[in-house]
Image: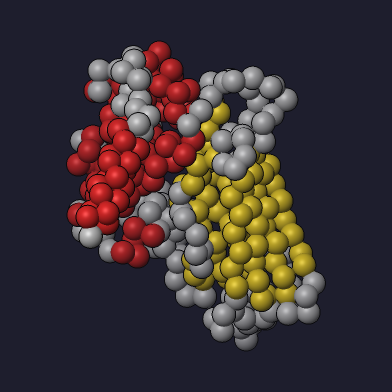
């Protein structure tokens, strides 16, 4: 009994030492909690900056102005922010944790302001009706760096009984590059495996921040599996510049094939304009609550 007690004490001491030896962030860098707050405000501000307006200011200029406003709010210089990002960049596992916390906060804010669980999953997404549905099963927000294992995110989805012959698909998302320098080179790949085991794939590159869509072609067969990946390359320059790519509002839209009507008009894919709002009401409340700005809904 005595020996067992000593053994337990040793284990407790060992765990305490391990906890004490956990590396902390040097004081000259922005601490994790503060970095999380800054990135949270950064995301909200960038969403507001992307809202169309009658102003002659271009979107890139507005993004920069909102970003500087966020830094001023937190009493941080751009030099401090850049150097801290470089520090976290070399410790990607810790940065991923911060990024996940930011996404959790954004989702919780939407819920607190009256959003449903479904709206949160479709955060700033199309509202789909009729024969269309968002079937994406993965994380709707991801972060990529040019270096393994954080440079590639793969996904595989099995079809179920809701899939029909002739279905078409669209993979859509928003990209936001946070680069100190160097070329931007990202790839999105989508492959469909049909009931006869044939595979058809689509791939596209995107090198600017904004919206990206990848659509599949017509096929009369039934899909049994979808697979693909997002990938961020190193570019031509082999340097230590900070390179981060954020992908948000990821959706995989399935369109059922529509039969021709009596007038023999061709079948089409339809997303009703009156419901295809980029920003749900609850999310607009959140943005107005955070920055006192009233966003404008934009139809797809």
Vertical order, 114 against 199 (above or below)? above
Counting from the top left corner in percent of width and height, residue 109 is at: 24, 49
Rendering quarter of residue 24: top left
Q: Front-most of 194 and 267?
A: 194
In the image, 56: left or right of 157?
left
Rendering quarter of residue 115: bottom left
Counting from the top left corner in percent of width and height, residue 226 is at: 64, 66
Tell me how many marks there are.
Answer: 0
Residue farthest toward the front in the current orientation of the protein: 2
Vertical order, 48 against 139 (above or below)? above
Residue depicted at x 65% and y 71%: 225
Here the colouring is secondary structure
Q: Front-most of 257 and 32?
A: 32
Rendering quarter of residue 10: top left
Counting from the top left corner in percent of width and height, residue 212 is at: 58, 47
In the image, 35: left or right of 155?
left
Counting from the top left corner in percent of width and height, residue 228 is at: 65, 57
Q: On the rendered image, what quadrant is the N terminus found in?
A: bottom left
Residue depicted at x 53% and y 21%: 180
Residue depicted at x 52% and y 75%: 131
Tell me if I can see residue 40 in this picture. no
Tell me if I can see residue 203 in this picture. yes
Residue depicted at x 48% and y 22%: 86
């Amino acid at each position: 009994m005595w020996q067992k007690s000593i053994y337990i004490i040793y284990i407790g001491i060992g765990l305490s030492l391990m906890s004490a030896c956990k590396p902390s962030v040097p004081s000259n860098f922005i601490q994790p909690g503060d970095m999380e707050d800054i990135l949270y405000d950064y995301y909200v501000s960038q969403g507001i900056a992307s809202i169309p307006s009658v102003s002659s200011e271009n979107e890139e200029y507005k993004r920069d102005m909102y970003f500087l406003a966020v830094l001023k709010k937190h009493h941080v210089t751009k030099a401090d922010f850049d150097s801290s990002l470089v520090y976290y960049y070399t410790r990607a596992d810790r940065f991923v944790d911060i990024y996940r916390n930011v996404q959790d906060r954004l989702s919780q804010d939407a819920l607190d302001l009256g959003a449903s669980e479904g709206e949160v999953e479709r955060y700033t997404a199309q509202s789909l009706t009729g024969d269309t549905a968002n079937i994406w099963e993965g994380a709707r927000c991801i972060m990529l760096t040019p270096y393994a294992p954080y440079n590639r995110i793969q996904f595989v989805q099995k079809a179920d009984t809701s899939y029909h012959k002739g279905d078409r698909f669209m993979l859509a998302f928003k990209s936001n590059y946070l680069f100190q320098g160097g070329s931007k080179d990202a790839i999105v790949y989508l492959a469909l495996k049909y009931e006869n085991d044939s595979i058809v794939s689509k791939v596209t590159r995107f090198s600017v921040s904004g919206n990206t869509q990848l659509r599949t072609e017509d096929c009369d067969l039934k899909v049994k599996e979808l697979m693909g990946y997002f990938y961020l390359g190193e570019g031509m320059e082999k340097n230590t510049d900070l390179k981060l790519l954020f992908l948000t509002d990821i959706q995989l839209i399935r369109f059922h094939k529509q039969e021709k009507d009596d007038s023999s008009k061709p079948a089409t894919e339809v997303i009703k304009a009156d419901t295809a709002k980029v920003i749900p009401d609850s999310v607009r409340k959140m943005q107005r609550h955070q920055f006192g700005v009233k966003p404008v809904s934009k139809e797809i």
